[in-house]
Image (tube, rainbow, N blue to C red):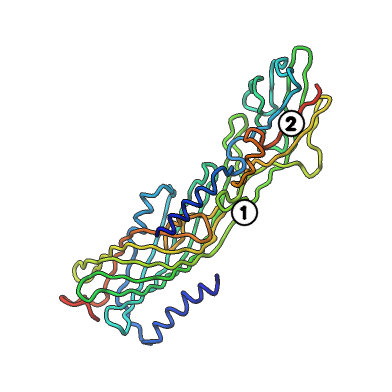
Amino acid sequence: MKFFFICALCYLLCSCGEQCGITAEPVAAIQFPFNTEASISKVSILGALQDVSNERVQFPLNLNADSTTYIFTQSNRIDTLTVYYKKRIYNASNTCGYVLDLEAPASGKTHTTTFKQIEVEYRSYYTPSHGAKLYYPEEESGIIVKINEL
Amino acid sequence: MKKLGYLIFVLIPLSIQAQDSTLKIRAVGVDVVKNVTHYVSGFDFQNPIIAECYVQFFTPKPNHYFSVSLGYASMARRAQNHFLQSFRGYSVKTTWEQYSKTSRKFFGYSGVFSYGTVKGELEIQGNYFPNYKTGTPYNQGIGVALEGFAGTSALLFKRIETRFLLRGGTIIADIGNPQFPYLTGLGISYLPEMLSFNVGATIQLFYLIKRAPKHHLTN
């Protein structure tokens, strides 16, 4: 019996930190060029039930579609950004089982935008239990959009 | 896995049957509360339906019995708050047990063969968008377990044997994804791994085909 309890304890210790993919509405981290967030007065999302705060840096993604379109309003201009993704369900581990994740679409088209230059990076929403979290802090897992030039 | 199942479920009964080709039924029974621990555990199974019935046979050795049981279980659970799993399983269990010559205490061991299917559904609650639901691939699997038990019984009306059991078992199973923490015929599986274990208590009601003698328990 002691053996089983030791096994159970070891298992619990080893499985610390595992994040089982998307378990709540996923977000994309959108990074603006230095000191430009303040100029955005409003952020809208097509099809969303409510607007999001313009002070946020993480914006919700629509799981019911394969893209989400954001509309950024500034005093003198309006920009749009559409991020594309593909949903994927796979077997991640014994603890998590099947997990839902987002990845780059097979077509290779990651975005359409009116911004001059952006990059979209796809990181897994699933974090394994052994160490990966140390390299990618929690807030930077998932889809990351870097707007390099407005 | 298949060889292990063969060893437990074919060879053990055959070895017992070989001793006496005319097995006589001692009792038929049901499990009244399959796993008392089931209801006090933190697993929060939804709509559990668990049934297990037994046929117990005399063996050539006095106070030694052999039984076969069939089990069925159906239940659901919410894993990680967003993953709904519906489980359905079937089991065959063979049991050897020995009663004390002087009291109604008994002990024994069982081999369990279990088959289960699991359907999964992911549901992500949305704050900004409508909720998202999708099914996960259908999963089925088998499990085997070796269980030891000890207990005591009380006779009602000379025919109804009420059996209180404490039991523990080792499980080798791979059913569900994530693995469903239940093995039909045995009970809750405490580790989400292929090798797991189970402990529990249960109550069985057996109806004796032949009335029990007043002062001794031999055949």
Q: Which residue is mark 1?
A: B137
Q: Quadrant of residue A145?
A: top right
Q: Is residue A120 left or right of residue B138?
A: right
Q: Amino acid at mark 1?
A: Pro
The chain identifier of the residue carrying mark 2 reads A
Marking on residue B97: none
Q: Which residue is mark 2?
A: A145
Q: Nearer the viewer, residue B128 or B189?
A: B189
Residue A141 percent location from the top left of the image:
66, 37
Residue A135 percent location from the top left of the image:
66, 39
Q: Nearer the viewer, residue B182 or A68?
A: B182
The crowd level at tag 2 (other Cα within 10 Å; few <14, some 14-19, many 20+) is many
* For discs 1 and 2, the disc positioned in front in the rendered view: 2
Q: Nearer the viewer, residue B98 or B81?
A: B98
Instruction: Find the residue positioned furthest to the left.
Output: B215
Count of numbered marks: 2
From this view, report whether residue B197 is shown above or below residue A31. Answer: below
Residue B14 percent location from the top left of the image:
44, 82
Q: Amino acid at mark 2?
A: Val
Q: Is residue A97 left or right of residue A29?
A: left
